[in-house]
Image (cartoon, rainbow, N blue to C red):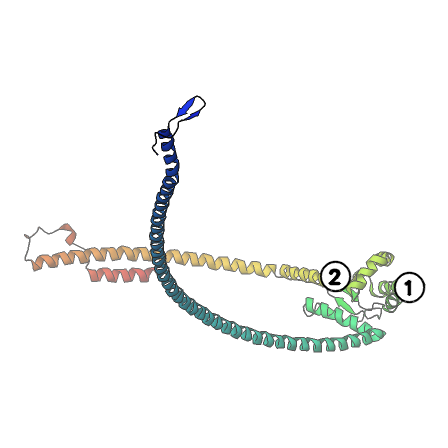
Amino acid sequence: MNIQDIPAVTIGSVTLSPLFLVAIAAVILLLPVVALIVVSLRGAAARARLMEETARRDEAAEARLAELLKAQAEMQGRLATMAEVFGSRQAELNQSISQRLDGMTHRLGTTITEQTKSTHDNLRTLQERLAVIDAAQNNIQSLAKDVVGLQAILSNKQTRGAFGQSRMETIVADGLPMGAYAFQTTLSNGSRPDCTIRMPNNSPPLVVDAKFPLEAWNSIRDTENPEQKKAASQQFRRDMEVHIRDISEKYLIPGETQDMAFLFVPSESIFAEIHENFEGIVQKAHRQKVVIVSPSLLMLSIQVIQAVLKDQRMREQAHLIQGEVIRLMEDLGRLDDRTRKLQSHFLAAQKDVEMIITSSDKLAKRGAKIEAMEFEAPGGGDADDVQPRSVESRTGLLKLRVVDED
């Protein structure tokens, strides 16, 4: 059957020839083959590209592996270097630590030695201080015994009076020279004051009484009851008034003693208490011309009296001093006259020595001329060469002059 025998196909207004239909059928049959070929070609291209990509990846992996190996080698080198550096640093650190430990051990040993020495010194000092404390304790114990003895003395009226008198005598004897005072002298009325002090300018002596009444005072200090204290104060005031009146009547003798007497109180605290709490006693004592004095006031009064006595002795010796000064001025005048005479002798001797030096210079010049054989004509000598006397005659004249002036 030929292709022309196939009837034509009409689709709508389009008529398709059998050849065209065959061609279309052939094309339809060839399309899967073409598609298969295209697919095969595309797969080959994809495989080629995949192989190329795999090759490139292998090359990149090899390059990275090489870089990694190189970096590993560098890292191993760095690690070796760091290990070496760390080893040297470790050795240096160990050496430094050893040196510091040695130095610290030496310092600790030195410090411990010094601390031990200081501890020994402190212990020795402590022992010395303990010895001093023991000695002070022994002194305190002995002082306590003395205080007990003093209390026993003060409890007895006679011994208490002797204690006050001994203290007064010590102050007077330390402040005045021998002969300026006397103890337990008898006055014209038969009374015997504890001390009399010689006054300057042949004035009557000053009387000092040391018998201070302490019984009522001790009662005031020992009692705590206000009424008993008041009664003791009244008793003390009466005793003081009686004692002041006795001093005024017995020791104030016109023309024989001073018109004032001292009542010695052997304690500064008692003296202060009297002036603070018993002003009436002080005023009555002043009216009776009796001055209440403490140890410090008595010492001050003694110093004033000593100064007055010294001034009196200076005035008594003033004429002797004046005579000595006059004789000293006469000796000074004679010394001045003799010094001036000696000065004139020295001036004359100096003038003669100058003339002798002038003559010796001329003799030296003349000798030099003779040595050089330089003679002048007769009659042509110097006028200065003609001298009335030679060097020896001048020396003898100087001696005669000094002898004549002496």
Task: Judge whether residue 257 can be spotted in this image.
Answer: no
Image position of 111 (left or right of 360): right
Regarding mark 2 in the picture, which secondary structure is present there?
helix
Of 218 and 187, nearer the camera is 218
Image position of 310 (left or right of 28): right
Q: Residues within 10 Å of mark 2 (few under 14, many from 20)?
A: some
Point out residue 88 in the picture as x, y percentages from the top left corner. 38, 66
Question: The residue under label 1 is which amino acid type?
Answer: Lys
Residue bearing mark 2 = 297
Quarter location, residue 147: bottom right
Point out residue 178 in the picture as x, y percentages from the top left corner. 68, 70
Task: Find the distance from the CA under tag 1 to the CA under tag 2.
Answer: 28 Å
Image position of 128 (left or right of 293): left
Of 19 and 60, nearer the camera is 19
Q: Residues within 10 Å of mark 1 (few under 14, many from 20)?
A: some
Q: Residue at x 25, y 62 (%)?
A: 396
Image position of 11 (left or right of 187): left
Residue 114 vertical placement versus 356 (above, below): below
The C terminus is located in which quarter? bottom left
Q: Residue at x 77, y 68 (%)?
A: 195
